[in-house]
Structure formats: C-alpha cells, structure tokens
Image: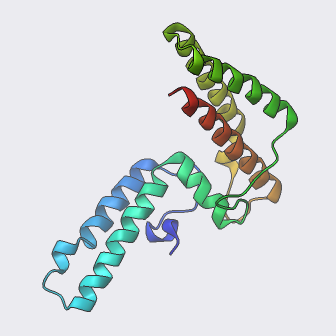
Amino acid sequence: MNYFQLFDIPVSFLPDEQVIRQRYFALSKKYHPDFAATLPVAEQMQTLEHATAVNKAYQVLSHFDKRMQYILLEKGKIEIEGKFNLPPDFLMEMMELSEEAMALKMEPAPDRLRQFQEKIDNYDKQLLQGIQPKLKAWDNTSATESLLDDIRTYYYKRKYLQRIRSQVS
C-alpha cells in the first residue's frame, strides 16, 4: 500500500505537513478499532490492519528523513542496507569531523562540544539549502533521473552527517 495514496496526497519530498496531520486524524478516526467493535471478526481485523497502515504511513510521511527514504526506495534509487559512493571531497570533510568527534569522546569539553554541534548544524543547513530547490522542483510525474540522483546523494550525505552527530550525542 502506497502511503501517499493512503493519505490521498501527491508524492512529494516537501508535502504540506498540516494536510498530512489532518488526513492522519481523519483516517485514524475512520479506522479506529473501537468503532469496529460490533462488526464481525473479519471486518474488525481488516479495520485493525487499516489502522496499523495509517499509523505506519503517518510515521513515515510526517518525518522528513523517513519520507525521503520512502520515496527513494519506491523509486528504486536506494536499498535498505545499500552502499553508496559519496564524493571524495565530502568524505575528506567527514573524516575530519569524525576525528573531531572521536577527540571529543575521549576528552569531553562542553564548549568544544557545543562548537562541534554548531559546526555539524551549519553543515547540515548548507546541505539542505543546496538541495532545497531540487526538492521543491521534484514532481513525481515528470522527475528526471538526474534530479533523483542529486536527492539520493543528499540523502546519503545527510545520513553520514547524522552518524557523526550521534557519536557525540
């Protein structure tokens, strides 16, 4: 079941999150198991399956990273445990950040930690600013492969950055 179809919204990396919430509440109410309590067991089970699907869809559609992963998976651009070769210059920058994170783990210092987290946040913001126009421009019906490739590269860069961030969290 396609989550965007379930919520009756167009496939988008940047959907209207208020619409997602509204559709979630409407579907949750429609498929709430308490309302099916008097139905035959088969219909109760079907309602429960729908409620579970609605909850899973909401968890994905309401979260930027999960939504991006979902679309890229649906488009065959990534695999769940897939590897992806990132640009060497990016990897060099990440190696430096990783070394800095390791040093902070070995010798924690609140001021240095705060500066490091700000550096990671700024890097993350720069990545997002670079991809934002492409995320907005992407259209499920007329998207080019190169546009999806750029979004996939962003997805993996962001994932890499999040791993480094988690080292010092």
Q: Considering only vertical position in the picture, is 134 above or below 55?
A: above
Q: Nearer the viewer, residue 52 or 149?
A: 52
The residue furthest top is 111
Image coordinates of residue 158 in percent, x first then y, are 65, 39
Image coordinates of residue 127 in percent, x first then y, are 69, 33
- Name the quadrant containing residue 139: bottom right
Q: Residue at x 61, y 55 (%)?
A: 69
The residue furthest front is 106
Residue 132: tell me if it is visible.
no
Image coordinates of residue 141 in percent, x first then y, are 69, 66
Residue 32: tell me if it is visible.
yes
Q: Nearer the viewer, residue 107 or 23?
A: 107
Q: Nearer the viewer, residue 4 or 93?
A: 93
Q: Considering only vertical position in the picture, is 69 above or below 131?
A: below
Q: How is the image coloured?
A: rainbow
- Name the quadrant containing residue 133: top right
The residue furthest left is 38
Q: Considering only vertical position in the picture, is 94 above or below 139?
A: above
Q: Residue at x 60, y 36 (%)?
A: 162
Q: Is residue 93 left or right of residue 118?
A: right
Q: Nearer the viewer, residue 149 or 78?
A: 78
Image coordinates of residue 122 in percent, x first then y, are 63, 22
Q: How many marks?
A: 0
Q: Residue at x 67, y 19 (%)?
A: 100
